Image (spheres, rainbow, N blue to C red):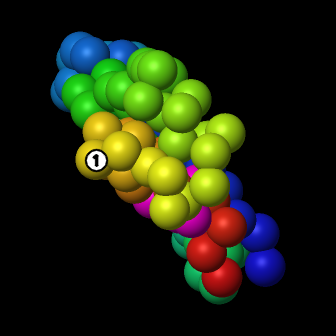
Amino acid sequence: MTHLLHIDTSPRGERSISRTLAKLYITDWQAAHPNDVVTYRDIGHYPVPFVSEAWIAGAYTPPEQHSPESIEAMRISDELVNKLYRK
């Protein structure tokens, strides 16, 4: 089983040629490989936050030392990473 990561980056929505082509590709892929997994992320409309000082603090300190800001920054990061490694 293959796991595809489909990322749309254009903010143009339905007017985007790259979004249209990617959607066609994914539709064809899923028809040919119905058991494969596709994870979708739209960073054109829902951008990933930039790495911040709070994220760096969270990444390089033990969890029991995380500030509320680090906890929130790491939550978003962990959620996205976990989506890539889901089974």
Whether residue 68 is visible, yes or no, is yes
Between residue 45 and residue 71, name the one nearer to us.
Answer: 71
Horizontal side, residue 26 vs residue 17: left or right: right
Q: In the picture, residue 8 is in which quadrant?
A: top left
Between residue 41 and residue 19, name the one nearer to us.
Answer: 41
Quarter of the picture holding the C terminus? bottom right
Q: How would you classify the magenta stretch by its main secondary structure? A: helix
Circle 1 SS class: helix
Q: Position of residue 70 (x, y in %)?
A: 40, 41
Horizontal side, residue 20 vs residue 7: left or right: left
Task: State the residue at coordinates (61%, 75%).
Answer: 86
Q: In the picture, residue 52 is in which quadrant?
A: top left
Q: Position of residue 18 (x, y in %)?
A: 46, 21
Q: Is residue 59 magenta?
A: no
Residue for badge 1: 68
Q: Which range of residues does the magenta coloring cover? A: 79-83
Q: Position of residue 17 (x, y in %)?
A: 39, 18
Q: Disc 1 marks which amino acid? A: Pro
